[in-house]
Image: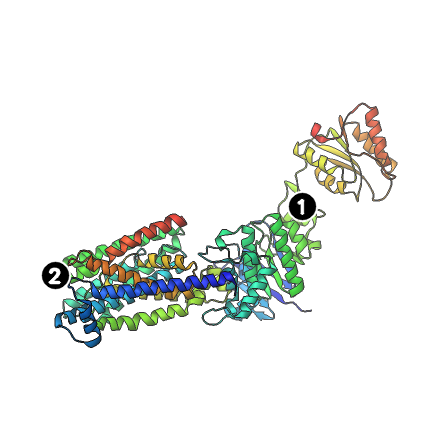
């Protein structure tokens, strides 16, 4: 084997190991840290023997673990969604948040929640996902119409941000006028938060996000071809129309799932794929997609940990933390690539 | 031998509006067809229709006796590869990664390269002398290198036809020659059919088996380089009212200087070319002679001088021609003599020079002195 080839593989493996170590470490910290202090010995007992005092048991099993699972699954989904959008627009700063897709989902979910909660006690997750998907497609539709008219990449992003603002404004309006006890919840959710996740939610997330992510992974080959541009991809035998539709649907769907459960979470979709690609020094989708998912999980685990513990017992929204880490990366990319 | 690539009544254009109608191309396997014509004439439109990037308006394109309408993208990818003009925006892709994408039609579901695929990539890169670039980032190489990498990508797609849109646009002459050499090799050794558009007419003349002139609503000229590269045909194709085309040199000359000539150039055997060009640049009209019709000076003199005195090839200069040249020279004030020695058949040029000397005309050896 050539030397350069093996150094490449070593790089991939090192990146993977680093991500796994971070992943494991963050999982442990997420279980251990929180507003209530539970000793390591108690945690082990609760996790492996099912014993321990009931409050601690509930905190670990009913609060921290499902919330952690949500960060893992939804974080991965967001990063993948971002990666797909970057491929689609051939633009490193495209992402579900900056293009207004998250906000579109948020608006529709808020609308669905308010309408349903005024009549019933609870909302079915499936309904929320469908509403979120409809919202995502709505925003995506606008973005696509705009992208046909403006050729400039930065203009597209500006338009996306504007769409996001409109959707947020409509959401705020609805929240303001919704006379319901759930307003507080709704408000928290609309800022982006993993709190309040139940095992039932986790089950739905797993069954929706994982198969979708698998499809994305299986599309690695056409994604790789598409990275050379539409014309070349077509000449290689890619069914461009179908492929573009798939990219739009998959990225919107992944983003919609996240928004339905955790609200809009900013900049994960841009920051994570960029970091992962620069560590791997490749953009080969076959390697980048799984790493992106793992990277997104790690990023969100970290952000959620900080959001929960930094000013405990006061909780920050995940979006606040992810923005603080994500925005500098976005600015860095813009300066480095001089996106016009 | 039957045609490998042919079109029947092909009409191409954008948005249902026909641009060029009834195109009939017949191309044998392993031949190179070049499209020439002014900018915006529709060369790219034709190429895009051939590669199925653009839906043709009517008519049919056949590859290997199959209409491309009936072929799927995948079928076409096995037959035809492209090198496009669009600037590629890749991210973190090495040159080898870019070339490897050519193996797309042959790899499995996840696109993992087999040993054989890797070998094909290597062979293609070696063929275009780009194997050394394999680990370089695609965005960090020169235009010439990039074009070679894209050609390697097309080659390792193992196509039977390669379509190239202006492949030499950004290349300096070194890479241009190299690229065209590679295409010739591909055509001869591997039987790959090449269809491309070129701006450089001299190159088109040298590399093509067949040339198509694209201008106007219909294709008026399609033929061998010998048939196409004619003075009138090319001058008309490019509307050359401000210059002329010389099929011998395959090159263009600027417009001849108008006015009453006061300079006579005695030349022959290639000695006049530099002086003619200098005079042309200084916008000084001139007369030249006495040249044989097979003389290289004669070719250029025809395009640049106001008047040429010439004799048939291989014949000694005849007295009547000498006399008329002598008479014309008398109206000139300056004589440039480029000749250092005289041979059997152009001895009369010496007489011309000596007469000028005798008449006291200003005699110089170099047009720069003017």
Does A214 sit left or right of B55 as displayed? left
From the viewer's side, name the closer residue of A243 and B98.
Answer: B98
Residue A10, picture quadrant:
bottom left
Does A89 sit left or right of A185 as displayed? right
Residue A314 image point, x, y percent? 15, 57
**Residue B220 visible in this rendered orientation of the protein:** no
Tell me if residue A170 comes above or below residue B263 in the rendering. Answer: below
Q: Extreme top residue here?
A: B360
Which mark identifies residue B351?
none
Q: Residues within 10 Å of mark 2 (few under 14, many from 20)?
A: few
Does A173 sit left or right of A146 as displayed? left
Q: Label 1: which residue?
A: B251
Tell me if residue B233 comes above or below residue B275 in the rendering. Answer: below
From the viewer's side, name the closer residue of B149 and B323.
Answer: B149
Residue B177 image point, x, y percent? 64, 52
Q: Residue at x 30, y 52 (%)?
A: A327
From the viewer's side, name the closer residue of B24 and B146.
Answer: B146
Callouts 2 and 1 close, C-beta under 8 Å? no
Which mark identifies residue A179?
2
Residue A294, picture quadrant:
bottom left
Cα gap from disc 2 to disc 1, whole angstroms: 83 Å
Tell me if residue A243 comes above or below residue B199 in the rendering. Answer: below
Chain of residue at mark 1: B
Chain of residue at mark 2: A
Residue A78 image point, x, y percent? 31, 62
**Residue A309 visible in this rendered orientation of the protein:** yes
Residue B249 image point, x, y percent? 70, 46
Badge 1 marks a residue whose secondary structure is strand
Badge 2 marks a residue whose secondary structure is loop
Does B39 sit left or right of A87 as displayed? right
């Amino acid at each position: 084997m050539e030397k350069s080839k093996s150094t490449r593989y070593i790089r991939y493996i090192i990146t993977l190991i680093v991500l796994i170590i971070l992943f494991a470490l963050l999982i442990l910290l997420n279980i251990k840290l929180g507003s209530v202090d539970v000793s390591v010995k108690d945690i082990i007992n609760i996790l492996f023997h099912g014993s321990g005092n009931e409050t601690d048991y509930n905190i670990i099993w009913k609060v921290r673990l499902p919330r952690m699972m949500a960060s893992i699954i939804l974080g991965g989904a967001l990063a993948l969604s971002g990666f797909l959008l970057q491929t689609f627009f051939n633009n490193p700063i495209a992402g579900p948040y900056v293009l207004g897709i998250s906000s579109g989902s948020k608006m529709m979910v808020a609308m669905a929640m308010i309408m349903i909660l005024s009549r019933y006690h609870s909302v079915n997750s499936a309904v929320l996902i469908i509403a979120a998907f409809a919202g995502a497609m709505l925003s995506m539709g606008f973005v696509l119409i705009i992208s046909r008219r403006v050729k400039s990449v930065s203009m597209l992003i500006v338009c996306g941000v504007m769409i996001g603002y409109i959707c947020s404004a409509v959401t705020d309006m609805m929240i303001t006028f919704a006379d319901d006890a759930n307003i507080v919840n709704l408000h928290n959710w609309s800022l982006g938060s993993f709190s309040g996740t139940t095992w039932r939610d986790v089950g739905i997330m797993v069954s929706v996000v994982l198969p979708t992510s698998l499809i994305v992974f299986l599309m690695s080959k056409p994604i790789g071809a598409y990275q050379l541009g539409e014309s070349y991809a077509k000449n290689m035998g890619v069914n461009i129309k179908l492929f573009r539709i798939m990219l739009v649907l998959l990225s919107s769907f992944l983003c919609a799932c996240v928004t339905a459960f955790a609200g809009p979470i900013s900049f994960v979709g841009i920051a994570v794929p960029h970091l992962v690609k620069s560590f791997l020094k490749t953009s080969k989708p076959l390697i980048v997609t799984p790493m992106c998912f793992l990277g997104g999980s790690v990023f969100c685990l970290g952000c959620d940990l900080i959001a929960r513990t930094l000013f405990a017992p006061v909780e920050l929204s995940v979006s606040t933390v992810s923005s603080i880490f994500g925005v500098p990366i976005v600015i860095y990319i813009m300066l480095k690539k001089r996106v016009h | 031998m039957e045609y490998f690539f042919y079109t029947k009544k092909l009409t191409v254009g954008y948005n249902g509006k026909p641009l060029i109608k009834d195109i009939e191309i017949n191309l044998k396997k392993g031949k190179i067809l070049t499209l020439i014509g002014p900018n915006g004439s529709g060369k790219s439109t034709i190429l895009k229709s051939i590669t199925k990037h653009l839906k043709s308006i009517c008519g049919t394109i056949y590859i290997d006796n199959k209409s491309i309408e009936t072929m799927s993208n995948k079928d076409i990818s096995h037959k035809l590869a492209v090198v496009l003009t669009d600037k590629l925006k890749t991210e973190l892709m090495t040159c080898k990664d870019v070339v490897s994408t050519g193996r797309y039609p042959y790899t499995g579901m996840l696109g993992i390269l087999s040993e054989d695929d890797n070998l094909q990539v290597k062979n293609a890169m070696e063929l275009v002398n780009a194997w050394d670039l394999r680990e370089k980032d695609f965005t960090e190489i020169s235009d010439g290198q990039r074009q070679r990498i894209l050609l390697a990508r097309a080659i390792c797609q193992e196509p039977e036809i390669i379509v190239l849109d202006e492949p030499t646009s950004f290349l300096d002459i070194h890479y241009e020659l190299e690229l065209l050499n590679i295409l010739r090799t591909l055509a001869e050794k591997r039987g790959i059919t090449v269809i491309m558009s070129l701006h450089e007419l001299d190159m088109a003349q040298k590399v093509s088996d067949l040339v198509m002139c694209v201008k106007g609503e219909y294709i008026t000229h399609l033929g061998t380089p010998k048939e196409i590269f004619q003075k009138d045909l090319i001058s008309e194709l490019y509307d050359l009212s401000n210059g002329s085309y010389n099929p011998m040199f395959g090159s263009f000359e600027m417009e001849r200087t108008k006015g009453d000539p006061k300079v006579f150039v005695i030349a022959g055997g290639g000695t006049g070319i530099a002086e003619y060009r200098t005079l042309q640049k200084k916008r000084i009209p001139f007369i030249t002679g006495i040249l044989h019709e097979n003389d290289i000076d004669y070719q250029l003199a025809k395009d640049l001088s106001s008047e040429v005195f010439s004799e048939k090839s291989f014949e000694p200069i005849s007295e009547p021609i000498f006399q008329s040249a002598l008479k014309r020279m008398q109206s000139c004030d300056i004589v440039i003599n480029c000749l250092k020695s005289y041979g059997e058949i152009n001895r009369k040029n010496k007489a011309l020079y000596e007469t000028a000397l005798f008449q006291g005309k200003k005699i110089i050896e170099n047009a720069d002195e003017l």
